[in-house]
Image: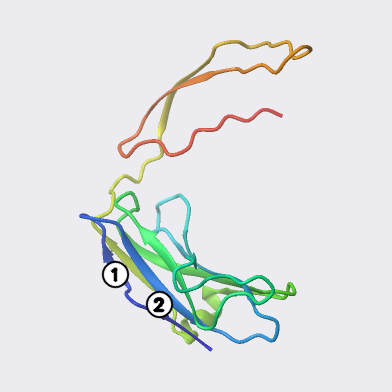
Amino acid sequence: NSVSFDKTSVNVAESDQTITATVDWSDASGLEVANIYYSRPEGISGSSIGFSPSGDGCEYESGVGYPNPCDIKATFTSNHPNGTWTLDYGYFNDIVGNSIYMYSNSGELAALGAPESIEVIGGTNDTDAPVINSVSFDKTSVNVAESDQTITATVDWSDASGLEVANIYYS
């Protein structure tokens, strides 16, 4: 069927900007998942951005799925990097579990109308990962025989745009 985007360029300098993609689809059982992903500008590590149903213009109905057509959305903020975000892939799944991945190199999504790129203006120029200066723990041993115990880690870090996630895992 088809995919259409309401814009392919956003300026996030003053406020967050949402892009809406309208997906026109067909399936006998109903659509359960509809996502389209764009990768960050070349050379910038980090997460891609996903367009997904927002509930506004695309409400899921149990046993039926999403309406046709369905609006899927992604919001870009000033924390997203400037530059050209490139089409990565789309993932669509029906209610009974049949799925399809459409990768950008196949040309399928572009042929349906998805733009090959989205331009972000006014976002961050911070392309460096956070620097972890030190990590310390309030204790390195606990006795959990009688009750749960908490260990607190203190992380000293620096980053131009701030730290979004800090996790330490032990196995």
Q: Residue furthest right?
A: 145
Q: Residue furthest bottom?
A: 1
Q: Which mark is residue 9?
A: 1
**The N terminus: image quadrant:** bottom right
Which residue: 29% across, 49% down?
124
Residue 4 drawn above or below residue 138: below
Residue type beneath disc 1: Ser
Q: Is label 1 in a helix, a strand or a loop?
A: strand
Residue type beneath disc 2: Pro
Residue 9 drawn above or below residue 5: above
Q: Which mark is residue 93?
A: none
Q: Which mark is residue 115?
A: 2
Which residue: 47% across, 57% down?
48
Q: Is label 2 in a helix, a strand or a loop?
A: loop
Nearest the camera: 56 or 26?
Answer: 56
Q: CA distance from mark 2 to mark 1?
A: 10 Å
Specify the quadrant of the image occupied by residue 97.
bottom right
